[in-house]
Image (cartoon, grey):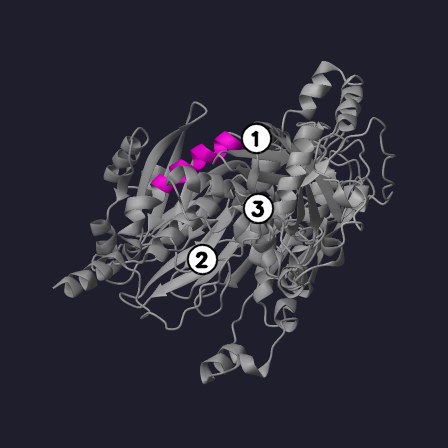
Amino acid sequence: MKRILLLASLLPALAFSQEQNKFAQLEQELPTPNEYRNAAGAPGHNYFQQKADYKIEVEIDDETQKLTGKETITYTNNSPDRLEYLWIQLDQNVRADDSDSKLISVERMEDFRSIGDLEKKMFYFDGGFKIEEVKTTSGKNLSYSINKTMLRIDLVKPLAPNGVISFNIKWWYNINNRMEVGGRSGFEHFEENDNYLYTIAQWFPRMCVYSDVEGWQNKQFLGRGEFALPFGDYEVSITVPADHIVGSTGELQNPNSVLSTTQRSRFKKAKNADTPILIVTQEEAETAEKKEQEIKGKKTWIFKAKNVRDFAFASSRKFMWDAQGVDIGGKKIMAMSYYPKEGNPLWERYSTKLVAHTLKTYSKYTVDYPYPVAISVHSKWIGMEYPMICFNGGRPEADGTYSKHTKYGMWGVIIHEVGHNFFPMIINSDERQWTWMDEGLNTFVQYLTEQEWERGYPSRRGPAHLITNYMRGDKDRISPIMTNSESIWQFGNNAYGKPATALNILRETIMGRELFDHAFKIYCERWKFKHPTPADFFRTMEDASAVDLDWFWRGWFYTTDHVDISIDAVDWFELNSGNPTIEKAKAKMEMESSDEHIGVSRNKKSIKETVNERDGDIDDFYGKHDIYNVDALDIQEYEDFKNTLAKAQLELLNSGKQIYEVTFSNIGGLPMPLILEFSFTDDTREVIRIPAEIWRRHEQKVSKVFVFDKEVSSLRLDPFLETADTDLDNNSWPTKKQPSRYELFKKKNLRENPMQRDLRLKELNN
C-alpha cells in the first residue's frame, strides 16, 4: 500500500491515440440504406419480394425408389425490373456424377484406410434431376439451359414489373439411400420386412430468389450452403402405396380418402388434448410393416400450404403418428410426430411434447407461430428442417435402451430443427450466403428453449465459456462469422456456436435481457415472411435499443479476434491525511515491519561497534533527530493546511478510504466489458460492471481507479463466465492458476445407458 497526498492542482490529461479502429462505425462495411431497406434496419417504403406458387403432382415408386413429378409454377414479378430470364434451383443435381461438390472435395490417401473406404469412393449412384419437359401452360416448349444445379428459362419477352407467368416442368429422379449416398433427405431401408422410410426434400425444381440485394441468388449448390427461396402458396398431391402414412408441409385436404374413421376420430380428439394422442399406434404400425395384410394399390394425399418458402414430406408404412393441439396466440396448432418402432421408447415419450414446447418458447421470443401444423419425423442420423416439418435423429438401441447422450441428442435436434420454422422458414434469410443468420440465431433461441425445458439442461452451445476453445484456436483455421457458407472453417463452431454465443453475451452482458428481447422481437416482427440481410439485423438491434453495437458486430462478426483480458497490476493506495501524528506513526510502523536487507542483518553481528557509536562528536542534529517524532513545526504546518480545506474535504482525508488502481491488457484483441468482483477482508463482495467503451481510446491497455471504505482481499475478472474469456489464469489478483486434470489411466469405456448402468451397479453391489 502506498500513502498518497492529493494536491490542489490538477495534472495535465494524458495524451491518447487517435486510432479507434475497433470502435469505428460500420458504415463502410454495410450497404447504403435505400428505398428497399432503410437506415433503421426495417423494410423500406419500396421494399419488394417475388411470389412463387406451385401446383405439384408427385409419386413415389416403392419398388424402384424413384420419384416422378410434374408442377405448374406461377411466378409474380413484384420487382421494378424487367426480367429477361428466370432461374430455377435443381438441388438434386448435387448428386449427379459430375457435380462440382464431388470434384472439389479435398482427398488424401490416408482417407482410404480400408477396402470399404475405396468402395465408397468408387460407388456410383445415378443421381440428379432428369428434366423431361419445360413448357408453357398451353403446351409450347420453353427455351431453357441447365448449368449444374441451376436451370435458366429464357423468356420470349421479358416479364414486366407486376407481370405474372405460369409454366410447367416435368421431371424424375432416383431417390438416394442416405446410409450409402448421404444427403439431407432420401430413404432409409429396413431389411426386416423390406420396408422403406422416405424423408423427401429438395425434390422439385424451385424458383430462386430475386431481390434488391443481389438480383438473382443463383449461387451454385455445393452441399453446405443451404437455400434461398421465395414465399408462395402450394397445392401438392402425393401418391404413395396405399398402406403408407404421409406427414407433410401444409394441411391435409382429403382426410376422408386416406384416413380411416378411427384415425380421423383420434385426430379430432388430439386437437384439444393436453398430451399427445396416438393416431396410428405402434401395434398398428407393426402390423402394417409386416405386410401380412398388405393393402394393394395407391393413395393420393393432398396438402395445401399458404405463404411458405418450401415444401417437404415423409412417407412410410412403418410410421406411428401422434398429435397434440397447442395454443399459440389464440390459435390451435397441431404438434405432431411420425416415427417407426425403432424410435421408441424415446419418440412416443418425448417428440411431440418437445415440438409443443419449442413452438411456445420460440413464439415468446420471436413471432407467434403462424402455420397450422408443426411436425417432427424420425429418421436415423439426420437433422434437417422445412416449413412445418423436420427430420430428426436420435435412435435407441435395438433392445430399446439408450444412452444419456442419445436422449439429449434427440431432445436437442428436435428443438433445433423445429426452431428452424422461425429461422429461416419465417424470418427468411439467405442461407446460401449467410449460414449464421439461420443457424446462429436459431441455436441461440434453441439454448433459451432448452433451459426452459429442463433446469440445468447441458446445452452444447450458447453459454460464453463453451466457445473459448474454438476462439483461442489456430487463426488459420478460424473464419469470421461474416464468411460465405461454403468458405467457413469449423462450420459448427463458426456458424452455430459463435453467433449463438455472441447473442447470448449481448443479452446477458452488453444490453441486458429486457433491451435485447425487445430489439430481437422487433427484428423478427419486421422481417417475418421477408428476406433480411445481416445489415438489417445489425441496424434493427441498435435502432430498437439505443445501444451502439458497431464495435460488437465488428469484433465478433468481422474478425477472428478472441477475448483475453488480463489483470496486469493492482496498486493499493490510502489517502495521506496530512496529520503528522497519524502519518509519522504509520510510517514508523511500516518501517519497522518492512523486510530487511541481508547485509544489514549480518552487519549487526559482524560489526561490533561503528565509529559514531564510539565517538559522540560524530552525530549532528540530523544524526540525533528522530524523523518519526512530531514536533511543533509539524503541528503548525498541519494547522495551516487544515485552514485551506472545507469541512467535507477534511472529513474525506480522514475517512480511511482504500484506493486501488487496476491495470488491464486486451491480449486477445476483442474489446469486452470489464466485469469485476471485489472481495473484501470482511468477507463481503461487490461486483462492478464497466462497459466495453473503456477501450475506445486505448485498445491495448487501460487502467481504472476504485475507491472503497474497506480493504480488498482479492479481485476476479469475468467471475460469471459471461464474456468468453479464453484464459482465466490472468483474471485474478492475487494470481490464481487453474490446475489441469492429468489422468494417468482410462476408465473402461461403457455405454452410459441407464438400464445397463443400473444392472452393472447391482452386480457390483452384490
Residue depicted at x 57% and y 49%: 734
Classify 10 Å Cα crowding around label 1: few (below 14), some (14-19), many (20 and above). some
| Relative side of 420 to 257, left or right | right
Q: Earlier in the sequence, mark 1 or mark 3?
A: 3
User: Which tag is nearer the camera, tag 1 or tag 2?
Assistant: 1
Height in image: 261 above or below 60? above
Which residue was labeled with disc 2?
382
* Location of residue 302 (image quadrant): top left
Which residue was labeled with disc 3?
501
Question: What amino acid is labelled 2 in the image?
Answer: Ile
Height in image: 43 above or below 500? above
Residue depicted at x 51% and y 40%: 445
Classify 10 Å Cα crowding around label 3: few (below 14), some (14-19), many (20 and above). many
- Label 1 element class: helix
Is residue 208 rendered magenta in the image? no
Question: What amino acid is labelled 3 in the image?
Answer: Thr
Question: What amino acid is labelled 1 in the image?
Answer: Asp
Which residue was labeled with disc 1?
517
- Residue range (magenta): 353-366
